Image (cartoon, helix red, strand yellow):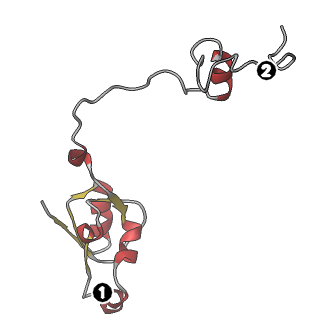
Amino acid sequence: HRSLTYRKHRKQPGGRGYAGGLDHHRILFDKYHPGYLGKVGMRYFHKLRNKFYCPTVNIDKLWSLLPAKAKEKASADNAPLIDVTQFGYFKVLGKGNLPSSLVKAKLLSKLAEKKIKGAGGAVLLTA
């Protein structure tokens, strides 16, 4: 069986675009584009995206959010207040380390809370 290139070109013998992806071009789709066809997962009807909106930040990035003046003023007895909601974050996660500071957030992971308190800081939860 020869390919379609040995004779005259006659319009679109295989169809236009993705035509035949489910039947006569199936081998090509499965070989070069695995996972392109079919469905996956479950559907969530009328999902309110705002309900699930929760940007996160790790504690190793918190110090970089502070302005330079606040970093200079910070000392062992004068810990800076870091309000993550001002920077567009809701939840603080526990990757990395942080010097003693007061962290204000809507949500915190257990590890983040443990590390902040372990460094001599404190946590403020807001609604």
Task: Residue 70 in the image: state x and y as whole percent.
Answer: 31, 87
Which of the pair 14/8 is nearer the observer?
8
Task: Residue 102 in the image: state x and y as whole percent.
Answer: 24, 75
User: Is any part of residue 93 visible from this angle?
Assistant: no
Mark 2 highlights which residue?
Answer: 9
- Which residue is at 34% across, 80% downward? 66
Neighbor class of circle 2 (other Cα within 10 Å; few <14, some 14-19, many 20+) is few
In this rendering, is residue 88 above or below 54? below
Task: Residue 106 in the image: state x and y as whole percent.
Answer: 20, 60
- Tell whether label 1 touches label 2 (CB within 8 Å): no
Mark 1 highlights which residue?
Answer: 76
- Which residue is at 30% across, 92% downward? 73
Which image quarter holds the C terminus? bottom left
Mark in the foreground, 2 or 1: 2
Neighbor class of circle 1 (other Cα within 10 Å; few <14, some 14-19, many 20+) is few
Amino acid marked by disc 1? Ala
- Which residue is at 63% across, 19% downward? 15
